Amino acid sequence: MKRLAKVLFIVMSFLLSIESSIFAYEENVDDYICNTKRDLLVLMLTYPECIKDIEKDEEGFIYLIMQNNNKVLYDDKKEKSHEQKFYNSDLQDTLEQIYPLDMITDVMEEGKDPGRIRSYSFLSNVYGGSKEAVQKNIINKNTYYGTMMFNKINGAADNLEKALNKVSELAKQNTKIYNFVSPTSGTFNYRVIKDTGQLSPHAFAIAIDLKSDPADYWKWCNREKGGNRISIYPEEIVKTFEECGFVWGGKWAHFDILHFEYRPEIILKAKCFGNNEVTENKEWYEGCEINQDTEALIQKINSIIDK
């Protein structure tokens, strides 16, 4: 009798574990679908002239259809370490970590690099797939801090000009701001990131480095010195650039404090969905401003992803 009871207990425990696993799997699937839809929405909202459509193939892989008719894969569905995502990322990887819009006072914890992961397939199709292609899209913007070479595609150059002009006005009210900005350290430079072989965002002319300091870069100093530099960095500069669609390299564990990079999709996802967890009683798009354009995109995304 005791043996029978023990067997029944083991069987019941096994069945309950299976049920629990299935429930967790269903929850994870729901979360994944929700986040997929959110990612597609922010991408289509922030790159309206670059993304023509989306499609889902018979195997369930999702692609962005670019204006040049090239396809960019959203998620390769491969398990990757944080380092592997840096070297071989898809769009899902780039939007996985939520960028913090609140100002920080120390180096981000290890593994937190929101915005540092880049889909090179996407960037190449938007801003240019070669040095020559990028150069064709570069324009000069005259700012208070000098003439800046920047990519005109998707409003990148216009937003850089807007950010620098606002920062120059803020510097009149807070003179210490100027000392963190000028002289700037460069915009367009077709090069790779040192020791990685990966193209720098400067190669696409979508990044600017402001005034350099020995404590600005994770390879130049230790985390303590980087944290000290972050703690005194003017919040006004960071907020201004973020409002114009730029992420700040100071909010990376691999900190790059002088670096600002045009990534409007990262900023929009943080604004719309940064504090919105997936819940049963909420629509996946809750948190996003709803208008005629967003309604049309929501319907398109639902029709494609849910089929």
Image (cartoon, helix red, strand yellow):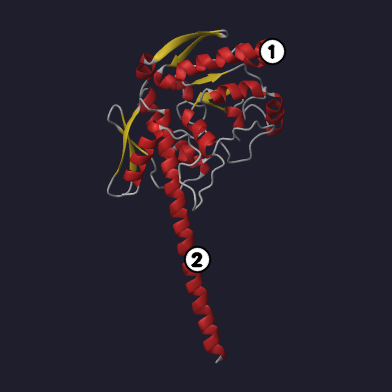
Q: Nearer the viewer, residue 176 or 286?
A: 286
Q: Position of residue 202 (x, y in %)?
A: 48, 21
Give the spatial CA distance, label 2 vs label 1: 58 Å
Q: For the point 64% across and 14% down, which residue is it?
A: 170
User: Residue 118 vs residue 172: left or right?
Assistant: left
Mark 2 and mark 1 in contact? Answer it, CB < 8 Å: no
Q: Position of residue 276 (x, y in %)?
A: 54, 43
Q: Position of residue 304 (x, y in %)?
A: 32, 44
- Image quadrant in which you'd find residue 123: top left
Image height check: is 60 above or below 188?
Answer: below
* Mark 1 residue type: Gln
* Mark 2 residue type: Ser
Q: Which mark is residue 305?
A: none
Image height check: is 27 above or below 134?
Answer: below
User: Residue 294 vs residue 65: left or right?
Assistant: right
User: Residue 200 vs residue 133: left or right?
Assistant: right
Compare marks 2 and 1 and give the one earlier in the sequence. 2
* Residue behind mark 1: 173
Image height check: is 22 above or below 225?
Answer: below
Residue lying furthest bottom: 1
* Label 2 Cα crowd, 10 Å radius (few <14 / some 14-19 / many 20+): few
Q: For the point 41% across and 31% down, which residue is it?
A: 45
Q: Position of residue 223 (x, y in %)?
A: 68, 33
* Residue behind mark 2: 20
Q: For the point 66% across and 34% down, which residue is it?
A: 107
